[in-house]
């Protein structure tokens, strides 16, 4: 679809500087944009690109004042970031939606499929599964026995949902994610081999959850592994059995949460954070990349490092660590001076 600067400014409540009839049909970054693209300037460090960008329209903050001529039409807005999200949502909504059920899909006669559902080729929906209205089930998805999926949820290609799991409404689960595989549970025998511990629980994913590609969420040994409402998980994340993740928590790639740990609400975890088993992480906790949480963490704490410590203390410790060679030389010098003073006595 094509939009004019006039239409975009009217939708967003912005001020046009330039040609109100300038048109765009796609969105791009300001450094890569070409004719016909709309770009945006939300971070001052990219300001230099506004003078070289090929974009036809650029969204800029209301306070922006150019230092030299700008070829693109500008739309000034009080909050560029929020405006970009709104436009991307508009573009997404304008895309044609997949419809119908492929003749190559396998849907059990004992399954229930709501109105307006799309099911792609080679998808499998097993006995007793219940799929809500307006869901999109892409090719090669597996929906196991007794799985329940709420309305308006999308399962991208290759998603696997094992038996008995529950997925809420308006969830997005991306390609290759596995929901409900067995938790990692084995009992050591006297001869050094292992007995597998049956994993008899399930996974419950509440409404408005996003799960990234190739993320794995294990079923509980008993009861449920629970991902609460509004959680956003990146790609390549491992959530172990009986874990609970609180509402609106956000986690970057390669987070690993070991079994039976409870994570609170509104937490933020950077990439490769590791959380040990059987601990409690409070609400609004922030852990920077590669942090290892090995003990209970209270509400509102900021953690860094392994083992983790308060982020401010970690930064101070890191500053000392970087100076260790110099500090070591000072210690050796002082030791030598002390030894010489002892000889003089």
Image (cartoon, grey):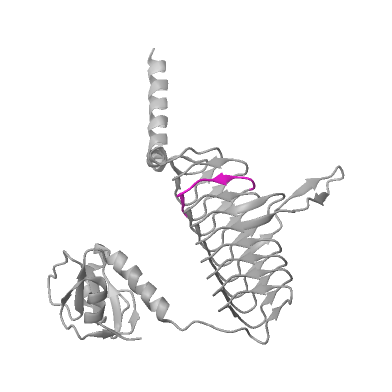
If the image is split into quadrants, where does the N terminus sit? bottom left
Q: Which x, y percent locates residue 312?
A: 38, 39
Q: Read off the magenta span.
A: 259-270
Q: Residue at x 72, y 49 (%)?
A: 222
Is residue 53 at all visible to an observer of this figure?
Answer: no
Q: Residue at x 69, y 64 (%)?
A: 162
Q: Quadrant of residue 108?
A: bottom right
Is residue 85 at all visible to an observer of this figure?
Answer: yes
Is residue 265 in the magenta section? yes
Is residue 183 in the magenta section? no
Q: Which x, y percent locates residue 344?
A: 38, 15
Q: Residue at x 62, y 41 (%)?
A: 278
In the drawing, does residue 245 fall left or right of residue 14? Answer: right
In the drawing, does residue 138 fall left or right of residue 66? Answer: right
Q: What secondary structure predominates along the stretch shown in magenta?
A: loop
Q: Quadrant of residue 327?
A: top left
Q: Nearer the viewer, residue 294 or 61?
A: 61
In the drawing, does residue 167 fall left or right of residue 270? Answer: right
Q: Which x, y percent locates residue 284?
A: 44, 45
Q: Is residue 211 above or below residue 301?
A: below
Q: Nearer the viewer, residue 318 or 304?
A: 304
Q: Looking at the image, how many numbered discs can be counted on the residues?
A: 0
Which residue sits furthest right? 191
Which residue sits furthest top? 345
In the drawing, does residue 29 fall left or right of residue 52? Answer: right
Q: Is residue 167 above or below residue 51?
A: above
If the image is split into quadrants, where does the C terminus sit? top left
Q: Which x, y percent locates residue 324?
A: 41, 39
């Amino acid at each position: 679809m094509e939009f004019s600067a006039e239409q975009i400014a009217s939708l967003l409540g912005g001020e046009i500087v330039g040609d109100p009839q300038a048109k765009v049909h796609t969105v791009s970054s300001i450094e890569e944009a070409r004719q016909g693209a709309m770009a945006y300037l939300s971070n001052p460090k990219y300001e230099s690109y506004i003078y070289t960008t090929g974009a036809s329209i650029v969204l800029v903050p209301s306070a922006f004042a150019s230092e030299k001529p700008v070829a693109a039409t500008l739309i000034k807005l009080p909050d560029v970031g929020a405006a970009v999200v709104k436009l991307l949502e508009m573009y997404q909504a304008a895309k044609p939606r997949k419809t119908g059920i492929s003749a190559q899909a396998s849907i059990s006669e004992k399954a229930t499929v709501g109105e307006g559902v799309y099911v792609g080729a080679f998808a499998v929906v097993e006995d007793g599964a219940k799929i809500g209205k307006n869901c999109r089930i892409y090719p090669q998805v597996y929906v196991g026995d007794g799985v329940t999926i709420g309305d308006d949820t999308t399962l991208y290609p290759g998603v696997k949902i094992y038996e008995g799991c529950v997925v809420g409404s308006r969830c997005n689960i991306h390609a290759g994610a596995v929901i409900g595989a067995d938790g990692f549970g084995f009992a050591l025998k006297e001869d050094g081999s292992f007995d597998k511990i049956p994993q008899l629980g399930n996974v419950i994913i509440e409404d408005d959850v996003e799960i990234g590609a190739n993320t794995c969420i294990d079923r509980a040994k008993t009861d449920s592994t629970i991902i609460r409402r509004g959680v956003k998980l990146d790609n390549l994340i491992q959530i172990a059995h009986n874990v609970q993740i609180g509402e609106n928590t956000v986690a970057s790639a390669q987070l690993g949460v070991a079994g039976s740990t409870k994570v609170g609400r509104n937490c933020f975890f950077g990439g490769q954070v590791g959380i040990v088993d059987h601990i409690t992480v409070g609400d609004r906790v922030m852990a920077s990349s590669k942090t290892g949480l090995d003990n209970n963490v209270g509400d509102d704490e900021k953690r860094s490092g392994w083992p983790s410590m308060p982020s401010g203390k970690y930064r101070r410790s890191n500053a000392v660590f970087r100076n260790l060679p110099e500090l070591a030389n000072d210690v050796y010098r002082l030791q030598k001076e002390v030894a010489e003073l002892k000889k003089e006595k």
